[in-house]
Image (tube, helix red, strand yellow):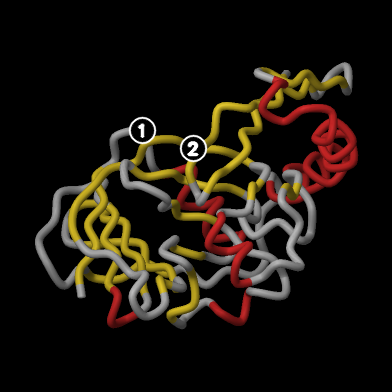
Amino acid sequence: MAFLIRAFDSCRAAQPSVLIDLVNGTSMIWNPPLLRLKALPSVTAGLIGALRLIAALSLPQAVQAREFVAMWASYPAGTIIIKQSERMLYFTTGEGTAVRYPIAIGKAGKAWQGQTSVKGKFVAPAWVAPVEVLHDHPQLSHLIPGGSSRNPMGAAAITLNLSEVAIHGTTARMRKSVGTAASYGCIRMYNEDIMDLYRRVDIGTPVVAIP
């Protein structure tokens, strides 16, 4: 069994990819000129962490923030609604109900509104620091491998058909930011919740962000 980890650039899936074989424990970089030799140790170092993270998240979660609620507006089943004023994400399940998750939204000037759709789904993705983030936080690593406890993508990422925006997990240190306006435009969730949402959505799932 194998899975694909893609590096992220401002929450977008970048071209460099790492194919990791869970059976043989080997990894292979696709398009290595972009990552160059510097990425190889990072990928190797992150392999064990990524596998541990995936194994842990395959087990039932004892703690979760999501809940099933009556839907307050009419949306087709299988729609993601980001309600910014509530700091909540809803995934409609039909018959007037939805799964509700607490989220962190973009900070002042970074939040977005409108309609889009799911572009990609990635488990334990690597993260490449965007230029804007590095400018504000120059101490950050340029590349953080998937599975690292420092990776802001967390357990999984759901990329959107918007520039530099994804719905993703978080680190233990940033869990407290869920429920606030704290990101650079991405939607941040608890790791247990992003994995639950990850299993529910497909490529093309509609996404709506409203005030």
Give SS at disc 1.
loop
Say which quadrant the N terminus sits in.
top right
Say which quadrant the C terminus sits in.
bottom left
* Corner quadrant of residue 54: top right
Residue depicted at 83% across the width and 42% down the height: 46
In the image, residue 98 above or below residue 126: below
**For the image shown, how many numbered marks are present on the structure?**
2
Residue depicted at 30% across the width and 71% down the height: 69
Q: Please state if 66 lies on the left or on the right of 7 as rendered.
A: left
In the image, residue 54 above or below residue 178: above
Residue depicted at 44% across the width and 51% down the height: 166
Q: Please state if 121 lies on the left or on the right of 207 as rendered.
A: right
* Corner quadrant of residue 138: bottom right
Residue that label 1 marks: 203
Question: Can you tell which mark lies on residue 42?
Answer: none
Residue depicted at 77% across the width and 27% down the height: 36
Counting from the top left corner in percent of width and height, residue 191 is at 61, 60
**Disc 2 from disc 1: Cα separation:** 7 Å
Tag 2: residue type? Answer: Lys
Counting from the top left corner in percent of width and height, residue 182 is at 49, 77
Q: Are marks 2 and 1 in contact (CB under 8 Å)?
A: yes
Residue density around tag 1, few if under 14, some if 14–19, many if 20 or more, within 10 Å: few
Tag 1: residue type? Answer: Ile
In the image, residue 172 above or below residue 86: above
Residue that label 2 marks: 121
Give SS at disc 2.
strand
Counting from the top left corner in percent of width and height, residue 147 is at 76, 48
